[in-house]
Image (cartoon, grey):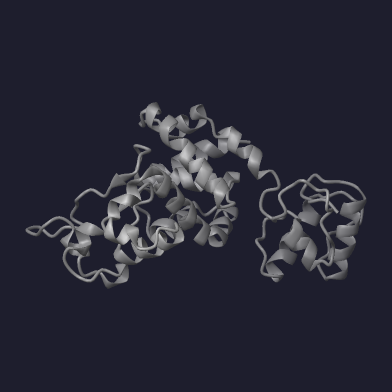
């Protein structure tokens, strides 16, 4: 059986509808037409079985229905986006520069390949997750280059040295001066805190190198992979938030708040409209 979604027709859809009905999720007429009723039944079935409720019947949903994906189906075998690889080609310099109206195009030309390569490496190179990555960059480092966090009243006391308010942040894993300055935000996503530097240094296969040399987080290859890995760690709830149309929640899952949300939302919506 092939991956099925709204608009699919034929015998495979009829078999799917029959399975859904037997499982207690009535799709309506068993007519081989994947319409709204079938999609609603698929979504209900997916939610019941702890799957991403995207209405796309891929390998995981088929497995729960005791059906098998055709071995010669060359689509992606997840239940997310069966056409993820071709999407990369649609995120052109023109599209991304439209999402970043205040950013020098030369920055985008230089750094976009790092981002797209990292997303592909970590198997999240579909439209939703690429939009999340780019929109996060728009919110956190709009220049489209890995950067150091700026000094502000949120990280520095009125009369203290830069980033002293981070020095003793246990939630960041910091252990006192000079951890605040050493592990300030860096990269495309503003990786912050001793704990995060330790975790992502290991995930990148760098051992503890980023702890002893935190500036490595601004290396564009490392910064792109940190962004992709961070999104990968939050992938399921991010996808659910986007499916629910809740971009604020999607942003919060990455940032922990709403900082830069207007820029994030603008970039996401522009990209969503341009990439079909």
Residue plotted at (35% across, 47% down):
140
Image side of residue 132 versus residue 244, left or right: left
Q: Residue furthest left?
A: 159
Compare residues 65 and 193 and report the one nearer the observer: 193
Image side of residue 94 versus residue 65, left or right: left
Residue plotted at (87% across, 64% down):
19
Which quadrant holds residue 86?
top right
Say if residue 271 shows up in the picture.
yes
The location of residue 179, given as percent across then percent down, is: 22, 64
**Vertical arrangement, residue 170 with respect to residue 149, above or below:** below
Total numbered labels placed on residues in the image:
0
The location of residue 215, given as percent across then percent down, is: 28, 51
Say if residue 192 shows up in the picture.
no
Which quadrant holds residue 39?
bottom right
The location of residue 271, given as percent across then percent down, is: 52, 37
The location of residue 125, given as percent across then percent down, is: 58, 46
Image side of residue 166 versus residue 90, left or right: left
Which quadrant holds residue 67?
bottom right
Quarter of the image containing the C terminus? top right
Residue plotted at (23% across, 71% down):
175
């Amino acid at each position: 059986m092939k991956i099925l979604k709204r608009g699919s027709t034929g015998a495979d859809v009829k078999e799917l509808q029959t399975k859904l009905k037997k499982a207690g999720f009535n799709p309506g007429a068993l007519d081989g037409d994947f319409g709204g009723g079938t999609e609603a039944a698929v979504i209900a079935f997916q939610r019941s079985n702890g799957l991403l409720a995207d209405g796309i019947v891929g390998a995981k949903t088929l497995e729960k229905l005791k059906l098998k994906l055709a071995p010669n189906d060359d689509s992606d075998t997840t239940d997310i986006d069966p056409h993820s690889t071709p999407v990369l080609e649609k995120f052109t310099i023109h599209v991304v520069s439209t999402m970043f109206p205040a950013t020098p195009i030369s920055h985008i030309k230089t750094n976009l390949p790092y981002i797209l390569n990292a997303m592909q490496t970590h198997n999240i190179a579909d439209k939703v997750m690429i939009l999340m990555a780019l929109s996060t960059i728009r919110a956190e480092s709009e220049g489209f280059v890995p950067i150091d966090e700026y000094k502000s009243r949120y990280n520095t006391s009125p009369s203290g040295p830069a980033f002293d308010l981070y020095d003793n942040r246990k939630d960041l894993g910091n252990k006192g001066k000079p951890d605040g300055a050493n592990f300030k935000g860096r990269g495309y996503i503003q990786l912050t805190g001793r704990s995060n530097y330790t975790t992502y240094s290991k995930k990148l296969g760098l051992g503890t190198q980023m702890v002893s040399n935190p500036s490595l987080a601004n290396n564009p290859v490392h910064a792109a992979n940190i962004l992709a890995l961070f999104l990968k760690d939050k992938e399921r709830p991010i996808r659910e938030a986007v499916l629910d149309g809740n971009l604020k929640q999607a942003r919060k899952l990455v940032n922990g708040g709403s900082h830069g949300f207007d820029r994030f939302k603008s970039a996401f919506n522009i990209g969503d409209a341009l990439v079909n």
